[in-house]
Image: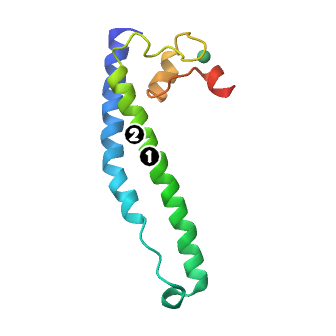
Amino acid sequence: MTNEEKSSLKAKLAKEIETLKKDIPGFEKLIKPIPPDNAIGRLTRMEAIQSKSIHEANLRAARQKLSRLERALTNIDDPAYGICSLCEQPIPIGRMMLMPETTTCVKCAER
Ligand SMILES: [Zn+2]
């Protein structure tokens, strides 16, 4: 990985972290306590429960991604950054640009 590639990855990580940090409070706001049946009707309540669990899954995924991105940004100057943690081969820069938080190459990720 060249220094130039590394600094553009660094910028990308910082930008994605910033975006997620802005998005997460919005996801948190979507998860509201569900009113009882007699307030909104049984069917609507079931829909509310369903969309709540979707929002919870989105929030969980966003938080996980944020912690992976932060870890990647912390470790970017580590010689192991950009090296697949499974096969120990360099991860192609194209994949790193798409997923700068990744720690495995495509082959290992599919395994
Ligand atoms: Zn690999």
Q: Is residue 78 above or below residue 35?
A: above
Numbered-mark total = 2
* Ligand 1 lies under 8 Å from the Cβ of mark 1: no
Crowd rating for badge 2 (residues with CA inside 10 Å; few <14, some 14–19, many 20+)? many
Above or below, 29 against 102 in this view is below
Q: Measuring 44% from the left and 46% from the top, which residue is drawn there?
A: 62
In the picture, the disc for residue 66 is 2
Under mark 2, the amino acid is: Leu
Q: Does the CB distance between marks 2 and 1 fall below 8 Å?
A: yes
Q: Position of residue 84 (x, y in %)?
A: 54, 16
* Model colouring: rainbow
Which residue is painted at 50% across and 20% down in the image?
94
Q: Where in the figure is residue 96, as x and y percent of width and height?
A: 47, 22
Q: Secondary structure at mark 2?
A: helix
What residue is shown with label 1? 62
Q: Secondary structure at mark 1?
A: helix
